[in-house]
Structures are given as structure tokens and as C-alpha cells.
Image (cartoon, helix red, strand yellow):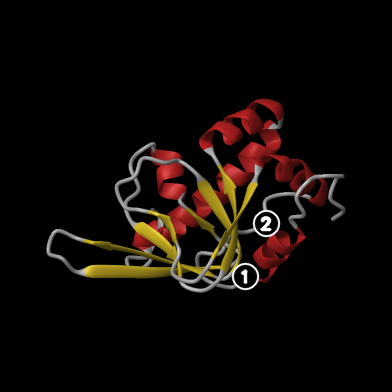
Amino acid sequence: MTPTPNAPDLHGLVQAIAQAHSDDSMNNPLRPEQWDTLSAYLQPCTLAAGQLLFNQGVLDRTLFLVESGSISVHYEDDKGRLRMALVPAGSVLGEGGFFSHRPRSATAQAATPSKLWALTALRFSELSNRQPAIALGLAMAAGAVMSKRLGNRRRRVASA
């Protein structure tokens, strides 16, 4: 994959997706030239260990692709019990809010130093209008991750 001039280099993200082996890893939905096009719609996000990515209850539809590190996802239910999931490199995060247009169902913070790529709802809308095949491929891949998580009771919280 050769990045276009001044475009972010997604090589590390694509490699993380290819090497991911967790049950809820994302499959690579795009060809190399499509990743190059997508890079113009993504914003890099670097987190230190313990740094908050988003809080439960916040209305935000940003979808995050995890290039490196791991993100802890947790919430307290009505009985005060803490539930957790760990989202590794090569997967997505925030797909629940992305698809549902509802507030975040959990809090996410970096468990280790992490690099992510953020795709806001506005940028996804632009991508959908200009590059529908890329938008569809990415949405289907994120939807597949969400489906896997919802089918696994212990990982369900990761679909924040």
C-alpha cells in the first residue's frame, strides 16, 4: 500500500487487521487503493494508558479502528456491577453508537498506549456520498464485528 501525498499512512492499521486473531477482529474489507482513499476521511488518535476515549451516556457516533494497543470497555449496570471487555488492535470500537444513533452504552479507555483512527459520522456521510463502495465495505465489516460481539454475552459490552 502506497499512501497518497499528504494522506495519513494506514499501513499499520491494515497490518493489525490482517494479523488480528480475536473472535471479534475485523476482517479486511478493502483493497489497498481503497485504504488510501479512506485515509483522507480518518483522524489519528493516540492515547496514553488510562486515557479516556469516551464516556458512557455521551451521544457520539464516531467509529474507531484500533491500530495498536488495547482499549478497555466497561460500565456499571443498575446493580453496580462492573462489566468489562478488552478490544485489541485490528478491531473496531464504538460501532454500537455509530449504527444506533444512541448514546454510548459503555465507557472506553486505553488499557495500554494505543493508536486509533477515528471516523466521525459527518466524515462517514461524506465518504458514503463520494465513495459508496468503500463506505459500504467498512460499514459491513463493522457490522460483522458488532454481530459477533452481540452474540457473545461476555463481549457484548464492547459494542459501545
Residue drawn at point x = 57 percent, y = 48 percent = 118
Return the x and y of residue 143 as percentages of the image width and height.
Answer: 50, 48
Residue lying at the far left of the rendered structure = 79
Disc 1 marks which amino acid?
Answer: Ala
Question: Which quadrant would the N terminus be assigned to in this image?
Answer: bottom right
Q: Does 63 appear above or below 136?
A: below
Return the x and y of residue 23 as percentages of the image width and height.
Answer: 50, 69
Identify the disc placed on residue 130: none
1 relative position to 160: left or right: right
- Secondary structure beneath dot 2 equals loop
Question: Is there a contact, CB below 8 Å, between mark 2 and mark 1?
Answer: no
- Secondary structure beneath dot 1 equals loop
Q: Does 36 appear above or below 93?
A: above
Disc count in the image? 2
Residue drawn at point x = 38 percent, y = 66 percent = 155
Q: Does 86 appear above or below 38?
A: below
Q: Quadrant of residue 148?
A: bottom left
Q: Which residue is mark 1?
A: 20
Within 10 angstroms of label 2, few (less than 14), some, or many (20 or more) residues?
A: some
Within 10 angstroms of label 1, few (less than 14), some, or many (20 or more) residues?
A: some
Q: Which residue is mark 2?
A: 28
Return the x and y of residue 11 as percentages of the image width and height.
Answer: 77, 60
The residue lying toward the viewer, choosing from 48 and 91, is 48
Return the x and y of residue 145 as percentages of the image width and height.
Answer: 50, 56
Q: CA distance from mark 2 to mark 1?
A: 10 Å
36 relative position to 117: left or right: right
Q: Quadrant of residue 86?
A: bottom left
Q: Does 129 appear above or below 64?
A: above
* Label 2 or label 1, whichever comes before in sequence order: 1
